[in-house]
Amino acid sequence: MVGSATVKVTLAGRRPSSLPADDDHPYRSGPWRPQEREWDAEDLDVVGDLPDDLEGVYLRNTENPVRPPIKRYHPFDGDGMIHAVRFGGGRASYRNRFVRTTGLLAEEEAGRALWAGIAESPTLSCRPDGWGARGRMKDASSTDVVVHAGVALSSFWQCGDLYQLDPLTLADRGRASWDGAFPGPGVSAHARVDEHTGELLFFNYATTAPYLHYGVLDASRRVSHYVPVELPGPRLPHDLAFTEQFTILNDLPLFWDPDLIARDRYASRFHPELASRFGILPRHGPPESVRWFEAEPTYVLHWANAFEDGDEVVLDGFFQRCPEPSDVPDGGPPDRTFRFLGADVLGTTLHRWRFNLRTGRTTEHDLTGRCTEFGTINGRHRGRRHRYVYATVNQPGWFLMNGIVRHDTETGDEQEYRFPDGVFCSETAVAPRVGSTAEDDGYLVTITIDMARDRSTCAVFDARRVADGPLAAAALPERVSSGTHSFWAPAVDLPGW
């Protein structure tokens, strides 16, 4: 246990909020209460013993709004804030920074919201420019974060700029330009890093033909591949997966109503009469090399991983039993706008698809009967055969994570750890132990929110013994807001470590 006398906390910055002091919005209060302050904290207080062979940085993105919306707020609209917890030598340090997006700075200067959010029509009194696949939205860059070629990249869920930060200091490095080759439609959240090749695989989508583009950024941050992928119309892909040779894109039957798009309105509808379609193409292949496979209708927000098995491409992801819920359940937030946010309401389960490249046949089945989402794996196995998926369970009806499940996809065995009532966690990240070779020889890292104690910690679990609970927890200087995605960057991949 590290004593409190060693803690060094500095207030590094502050962005005063103009949100109401008595805010009762369900996703701007309680566990979603946003932060105004940016901290630097060294030698954090730790309960338990941090492993000496845990070396690297856990990064997490957070929707952290500063201004009231034009009309209606959705948690995906919040301004991006990156949290970085650095581990090494049995100690931990912490920094958090707002992502200095063009939208954040413009609204700061204006003192009010300038763009419509996801639950608002872009025809309201907002600026006519903006970002997003539908256009006229603010690029909050608050969805995802990855580290590629030693640079942290934050991203927006519906396509926008990639904002660059130093993964250790969180110093602002501006928008990615890729030597002038950054795509005009932007990049969607869930660009994926192949740790073996150093490549970043990305996509974007729009309401105009060809509707989807796919590309590859090489290890020197050069766009080595960028091609259109033809779709029947506007779609809402949220993630991609890849194997050693192939990339898997998707055309799923939940998408914007085309009749409403014509009237500049955007509402997604599920079309159960349509099949789910999966496009498999060689990683650097031309558009005509895409092969489409059909499967049961569903929607999938997040893929866990994909790999090759003989003639087959195997894909694991979170199949939704109810992609278009009619309402939130009792006990959930009192607004049906948020009915798409609870994993239990959507009925998500870890699912496996097999696409036979020789016969063209698709087979699929559930890997579990348990409802989980936000699955992560050991990054060294991304695109390669994996066995373990570490996912979260949610507070019923809410976009709040309150437990971690380890899925063994070979045996079906599951381990679960539930946090105490009123304690929530983040998407976990797998941190391989320094020098390890086995897939599950390492740690899980997550940020927690303890409502009763009004505090947050960064908790570390043994990846093999999730049900035992945290090995150690480092206290953060302030309670962190709930958020979305995370990333583990091992020390060996970080220049300046």
Image (cartoon, rainbow, N blue to C red):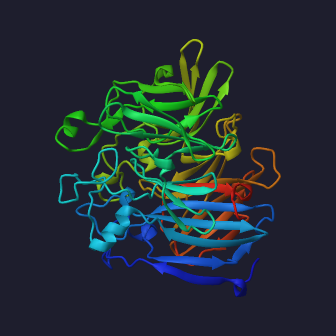
Is residue 24 shown to the viewer in this render? Answer: no
Q: Residue furthest bottom?
A: 5
Q: Is residue 35 above or below residue 244?
A: below
What residue is rendered at 58% in x and 83% in y?
A: 10
Q: Of 52 and 130, which appears nearest the observer?
A: 130
Q: x, y percentage for residue 325?
A: 34, 43
Horizontally, residue 79 falls left or right of residue 240, namely left
At which x and y percent is residue 151?
A: 59, 57
Q: Position of residue 209 (x, y in %)?
A: 32, 31
User: From this viewpoint, which residue is outermost toward the top?
Assistant: 359
Residue 324 higher or lower than 446, as above or below? above
Q: Residue at x 49, y 22 (%)?
A: 290
Q: Is residue 12 above or below residue 312?
A: below
Q: Quadrant of the N terminus?
A: bottom right
Query: Split into 4 quadrants, where in the image is the C terminus?
Result: bottom right
* Residue 4: quadrant of the picture: bottom right
Q: Quadrant of residue 127?
A: bottom left
| Quarter of the rendering containing residue 388 | top right
Residue in the picture at 60% in, 13% down: 358
Q: Position of residue 312 (x, y in %)?
A: 62, 21
Q: Is residue 367 above or below residue 119?
A: above
